């Protein structure tokens, strides 16, 4: 795969020297740089034709399977030397973007396109017609992602949400979270890694392998199952969600607690949804079976949490707790 930013142009590029009229901005007036770039005029069909030819060559030469299409700066000085009516500029611009997408996805139906605009700036249905997954946010901090992915799930299925395990300290927040916590959050999306593998310890590499193997077991469930929001990160310290198969025979649960508070709740269970009440389920990590109505009304045991008085009995505690559970009907 390759990362593209086809809507941008560098001031010192050959194309800029050859076709300055293809750049957005009024002639003879100062033009603002963003990320040391300017923006190409996609309202001009000649620009779209040029980029279609160039991108087609790169797709074929590199035999690409995947393209991340990014758009990382705002449009400033919105003026097209191609248009007579400047009031049509923004509308014509996005139609040009759609036209390039249409031509490339038609010619290369097996290439996966992921859209991005500084993160989730283009997470909309128009763009998802061409790019079936979008990068939810450039904020990859796992604690932040609980709110980001929870909110995104209100409008879009998990299979569209770009979610990665990133390096620590996180480049957006400088927060350090456990690799397990980061992986448990990223499972509920497209799942991937955004870090330098050569910087991982042998222990971390082993854990990454286990995470990848686990995701391969659940990826069809994540992509096709029904998503339930069990606990909102906007309403307390805990976040919980689950994905259940259409027939209720399999489910995947994620539970997270970002910050520990003294004197935790006495009832340390999580009520589930979407299961068959009269069916029995086995859960990885438990020796006993559970009935569906038991899990939905009494709840799934989360294990004893550290409270100062049970240091030898506690099964979990501290900040950045996370647990995943895989359920299967027996």
Image (spheres, rainbow, N blue to C red):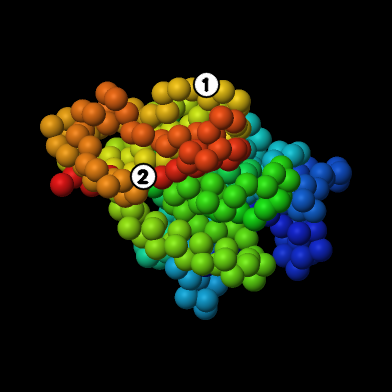
Q: Position of residue 294 (x, y in %)?
A: 23, 29
Residue 170 vs residue 208: left or right? right
Binning the other alpha carbons within 10 Å of mark 2 as few (below 14), some (14 to 19) or many (20 upward) gives some
Q: Position of residue 271 (x, y in %)?
A: 33, 27
Instruction: Give the label on residue 211, or none.
Output: none
Binning the other alpha carbons within 10 Å of mark 1 as few (below 14), some (14 to 19) or many (20 upward) gives few
Residue positioned 52% across, 51% down in the render: 180
Q: Which of 171 and 160 is in front in this view?
A: 171
> Is residue 6 visible from the viewing direction of this image?
no
Camera-nearest label, 1 or 2: 2
Residue positioned 60% across, 38% down in the render: 318
> Is residue 244 visible from the viewing direction of this image?
yes
> Where is 256 relative to 215, above or below?
above
Residue farthest toward the bottom in the current orientation of the protein = 61
Which mark is first along the chain, 2 or 1?
1
Q: Which of 283 and 216 is in front in this view?
A: 283
> Where is 313 relative to 71, above or below?
above
Residue 176 vs residue 326: left or right? right
Q: Which of 157 and 42 is in front in this view?
A: 157
Residue position marked by numbered label 1 in the rendering = 235
Q: Quadrant of residue 205?
A: bottom right
State the CA–CA distance, disc 1 to disc 2.
22 Å
> Where is 121 relative to 298, above or below?
below
Residue position marked by numbered label 2 in the rendering = 325
Residue positioned 36% across, 44% down in the render: 325
Residue positioned 67% across, 53% down in the render: 168
How many callouts does the rendering have? 2
Q: Position of residue 218 (x, y in %)?
A: 33, 53
């Amino acid at each position: 795969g390759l990362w593209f930013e086809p809507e941008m142009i560098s001031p010192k590029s050959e194309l800029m020297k050859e076709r300055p009229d293809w750049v957005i901005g009024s002639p003879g007036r100062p033009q603002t740089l963003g990320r040391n770039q300017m923006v190409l005029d996609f309202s001009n069909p000649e620009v779209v034709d040029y980029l279609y030819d160039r991108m087609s060559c790169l797709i074929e030469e590199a035999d690409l399977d995947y393209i991340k299409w990014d758009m990382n700066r705002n449009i400033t000085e919105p003026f097209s030397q191609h248009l007579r009516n400047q009031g049509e500029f923004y509308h014509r611009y996005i139609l040009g973007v759609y036209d390039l997408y249409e031509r490339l996805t038609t010619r290369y139906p097996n290439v996966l396109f992921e859209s991005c605009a500084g993160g989730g700036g283009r997470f909309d249905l128009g763009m998802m017609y061409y790019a079936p997954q979008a990068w939810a946010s450039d904020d990859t901090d796992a604690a932040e992602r609980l709110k980001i992915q929870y909110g995104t799930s209100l409008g879009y299925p998990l299979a569209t949400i770009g979610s990665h395990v990133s390096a620590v300290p996180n480049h957006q927040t400088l927060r350090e979270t456990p690799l397990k916590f980061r992986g448990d959050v990223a499972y509920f999306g497209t799942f991937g890694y955004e870090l330098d593998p050569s910087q991982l310890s042998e222990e971390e590499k082993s854990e990454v392998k286990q995470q990848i193997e686990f995701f391969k077991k659940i990826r069809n469930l994540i992509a096709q199952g029904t998503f339930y929001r069990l606990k909102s990160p906007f309403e307390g310290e805990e976040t919980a969600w689950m994905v259940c198969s259409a027939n209720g025979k399999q489910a995947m649960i994620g539970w997270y607690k970002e910050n520990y508070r003294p004197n935790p709740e006495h009832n340390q269970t999580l009520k589930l949804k979407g299961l068959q009440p009269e069916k029995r389920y086995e859960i990885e990590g438990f020796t006993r079976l559970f009935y569906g109505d038991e899990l939905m009304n009494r709840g799934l045991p989360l294990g004893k949490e550290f409270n100062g008085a049970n240091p030898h009995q506690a099964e979990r505690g501290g900040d950045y707790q996370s647990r995943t559970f895989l359920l299967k009907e027996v």
